[in-house]
Each structure stands twice: as structure tokens, then as C-alpha cells.
Image (cartoon, helix red, strand yellow):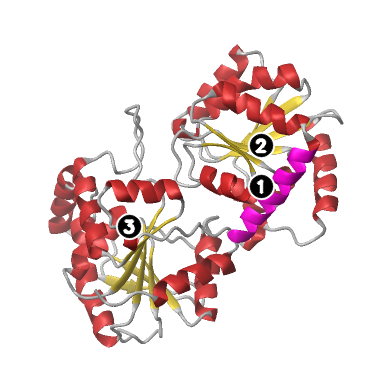
Amino acid sequence: MSAAGDGAKLLYFTAAYRPGSMAIPVHTELLAAFGERGYPSAIVTLAPPGQREPIAYVPDGDLPVYRVAISRGLRDRLANRYARTRLGYPYLLTAARYLRPWLRARLAADPDLILQVEMAFPLGAVVRRALGGTPARTVVTLHGGDVLWPDDGSAYGYAGLPAARRELRRVFAAFSRVRPMAPILARAAAGFGCPPEKIAVVPLNVSEGFYPTGPLAELRAASRRATLVELGLPADARLLITSGRVLPIKGFDILVDALPAVLAAHPTTYLLLYGPDRGGTTDALRAQVAALGLTERVRFLGTLPFDGQGRFLAAADLSVIPSTLDGFNRHGIEAGAHGTPIVASTGAGIADFVRDYGAGRAVPSRDTVALATAINDLLADRAAWERASAGAIRLADACRTGHVADALVALYGGIGRG
């Protein structure tokens, strides 16, 4: 295939693209929307170890996908070892080296090509090194793990590494535009010296599979009935829902600590928690729940498929996001699409949007009392709940793929080659 033989006007760089995974619809729906708006796209991703070709063309149906080699032999293994210890990411040098000639050929064939890169580090750093000063129209999306780091010394993301911070400053200087998915990420970019005129906040898109198609009131009522029966809960149960990778920065332990105060005001409250375990965090939560005597009040639902989440999101009274550090938090949008209001910690990027849209309550990070108070207030005040539900629906609508694509295409239109 020639350098521009796929007709793409936009190259979409993502570190991992695995057809069949639950995260893929977020990418594929967005790229389909780009195509409808005059930007046919191709995926550029990192290959699994052992790929022999520098760039392999492995389309996913009609979607062009290119995999960049990361380790083809002894020289690469040595380079990867050096990059892991000195540069903060093992494939920074090898991926940039294999990407460089292919990417420059693409730009020579089409100088107006848009390069949309997901995460400033490591992938933004890879693309910057591959470009090596070649003029290009570039946009980098900030997700959280690239620019945020915890203040308690726990392991999260890349920005705690001095080498990564150096690379981030270079990326922000080199790229045409920086697209944080939330204001918290815009503030982080500014802290790395990113010029404010480059920054444009555009929220993440959420797969259309999370947006109900029928009457919402009927869906909520039916979902609630089914959930109560499935979990064996009483008819007057109040349901809190939270989800995500079960790891310390998600703050689920803070929510568990807040539950006794919620139960004192609303004795029939239950917490539903789902998501994949990371590092045994679920076992620690179970022990905490047992120590507080809450075993019957907290239901661990494990990892749910995309199509198995909607009924719980619609059944819940509130979505609670107690994160201590989170670039956005997709769960709140998925719940909001079902009319469920959001209580979010300011450690989560979604908190700014919750305030702006009146979608619920934003509370200080790690503040158990404030978290319990916000939950209790919304459970007690039906009129406030209704207003927050309407706000949550508006917020979720702003994250529909079409609306996000419109905002990004508008952003592309203002970018010159630099």
C-alpha cells in the first residue's frame, strides 16, 4: 500500500488497539464520525513484541490499522532496556525510529494530514521524536495518566517520573494543539508550561451503546425492579453505584467510610460496585467493608460487560465518584445518560462538568463528611434530585460521539502546519 493509499486525512495514534476489546467502540465510533465530517481516518498503534515489519498494515474491517514495531532484535532489546530506565518508557526510542520514515512519507504525500495522538506521554513523545521537527498539524489528547500524579507517593501514571516530565514539556512546546478532556487536565498542562492559547478542553466521547433509546422513566422503573429482584434487595432500597478499575486512586475506600453516615440518614441504602481488580484492591475493600459491618450493604459485582451495565446504571439513585485522582471518569457520563445524578470528588476531572451542568454535587477530595452529606442531601430532596438528573442527562449528551467529533473537527480547522 502506498504512503497515502488508504485515503486517510487523519492519523489517530493510540498505544493499544485490540479488536474485540470493550474499549474499542470509543475509538471506532469517533473515527466513523470523523469520516462523516470529511476526515477519513486510520489507526496507528504499537505492535506486540516480535513483529518483524517496521510498520505492519492490519486493517480492522474497513478501518485501516497500522502497527509500529517495538522490538525486532537484540539492538531493540538493548534500546528498550535503556529507555525503560532512563526515559520512563521502554519503547520510546524504538517506536519513534520505526515510525519516522513512514510518518514523514505520509506527510510528504499530504502535508495537511492531521495527527491526533492519545496521551502526551508516552505516545506524544514517540510522535514528537518521530517527527523530529517536520512540520505537521498535531493535536494531543490528555487522559490523566500522562500528566497527573498522586501526592501520596502511590504509583500512578507517568508524570511522577522526571524523564517523563521533561518529555511532556517538549511535547507541549512542539504540538499545535493540546486537548485536555477536563479542566483538571488543562490545569496540569499549564503547570508543564503549555501555552494557554494551545489548550482546548473537549470531553471524552462515550459509546452510543450507553445511551438508552426508549422512554427513560420506563427504563429506570423496569431496571430498578429487575435489579432489586436479581440482588435480593428490598423494594424501598436506595441504590448507590460506582465503578472503574478497582485501585487506590479511585477512592472506593473513602466511599465505604462514608456509608455509615449515609445509612444513619437513609437506612435502606446499598452500594453497588463493579470493575476489574487491580493489585488485590478488591480484597482490601472487602476487608474494610467487613470491619465496618457493611457486608450486606456493599455488593461487589465484579467485571461487567458493556451490555451488562445499563440496567444497574438506570436502577441507581446516584452515581458516586470518590476518586482522589482521575483524568475524567467515564462512569459518571454512562450513569448520567440513564438519568442518574452524580456525586463526584474534585479529584476526578468530571467534577468541573458536574458543577457546570448542575448534574449533581462536587465535593472536596478525600472528604468523607462532605461526600456523605452530598449523598444524603440528594437522596432526601426529590426536587434537587430531579434537577440533577436533568443536568446529568445534558452532560451525557455533550459527550455523545457526534458532539465530541464536531468540537474536534472545529479544533482541526484552526490548525496550521507548525
Task: Identify which residue is drawn at 38% across, 51% down.
Answer: 186
Find residue 266 and report its horizontal and vertical position in percent: 76, 23
Q: Nearer the viewer, mark 3 or mark 2?
A: 3
**Three-letter amino acid code of the residue under disc 3:** Pro
Callout 1 crowding tier (Cα within 10 Å): few <14, some 14–19, many ≥20: many
Callout 2 crowding tier (Cα within 10 Å): few <14, some 14–19, many ≥20: many
Task: Identify which residue is drawn at 58% across, 21% down.
Answer: 369
Q: Secondary structure at mark 3?
A: helix
Do the residues bearing badges 2 and 1 touch, measured as CB atoms within 8 Å? yes
Residue 140, above or below 10: above
- Which of the 4 image quadrants contains residue 237? top right
Task: Identify which residue is drawn at 63% across, 44% down.
Answer: 304
Residue pointed to by mark 3: 196
Residue pointed to by mark 1: 335
**Three-letter amino acid code of the residue under disc 1:** Ala
Q: Could you tell me how far apart the alpha carbons at marks 3 and 2 are, in whole angstroms? A: 36 Å
Magenta span covers which residues? Answer: 383-398
Residue pointed to by mark 2: 241
Residue 21 visible in the snapshot: yes
- Which of the 4 image quadrants contains residue 298? top right
Magenta highlight: main SS: helix
Label 3 or label 1, whichever comes before in sequence order: 3
Find residue 337 and report its horizontal and vertical position in percent: 68, 53
Q: Nearer the viewer, mark 3 or mark 1?
A: 3
Q: Could you tell me how far apart the alpha carbons at marks 3 and 1 are, in whole angstroms? A: 32 Å
